[in-house]
Amino acid sequence: MSESLSHDTFSLLRKDFELPEVTTDFDEEKAISTLSKVIAYMLDREFERLLQICYRIDLGEEKLKKILHLSEPDQVAPDLARALWVRQKQKIEIRKRYSANE
């Protein structure tokens, strides 16, 4: 994935999850790891807010239910972080595709 796309994806998620600024040694896996830690906290303490963010991002109810119910307990946060990352990345790619066609 291009570095610009990774940064754009992180920026979108940063707003919703109040993530720290991008560091110089930024990459997709580190971003997902950071997001995973925040999601793990939210699963325990801010579950309703987490659900609201997932719906606002348009993760998809079926995908969310599948992750919450079928992932191993220690994998829920990383699986959800990756799913949210992929969804936001898709949105950016679609926006770029349509803005290039105008």
Image (tube, helix red, strand yellow):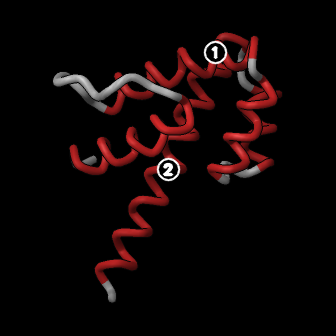
Q: Mark 1 — residue?
A: 40
Q: Amino acid at mark 1?
A: Ala
Image height of 90 relative to 51, above or below: below
Q: In which quarter of the view is residue 76 placed? A: top right
Position of residue 92 measured from the top left corner of the image (x, y, whole percent): 41, 59
Q: Quadrant of the C terminus?
A: bottom left
Position of residue 81 measured from the top left corner of the image (x, y, whole percent): 55, 30
Residue at the image point whose x is 66% and y is 48% from the top = 59
Q: Is residue 8 left or right of residue 15?
A: left
Residue at the image point whose x is 30% and y is 42% from the top = 7
Q: CA distance from mark 1 to mark 2?
A: 19 Å
- Disc number for residue 90: none
Residue furthest bottom in the image = 102
Q: Mark 2 — residue?
A: 88
- Tally of marks: 2
Q: Amino acid at mark 2?
A: Gln
Q: Is residue 52 left or right of residue 88?
A: right
Q: Is residue 82 left or right of residue 22?
A: right
Circle 1: element type: helix
Image height of 77 relative to 13, above or below: above
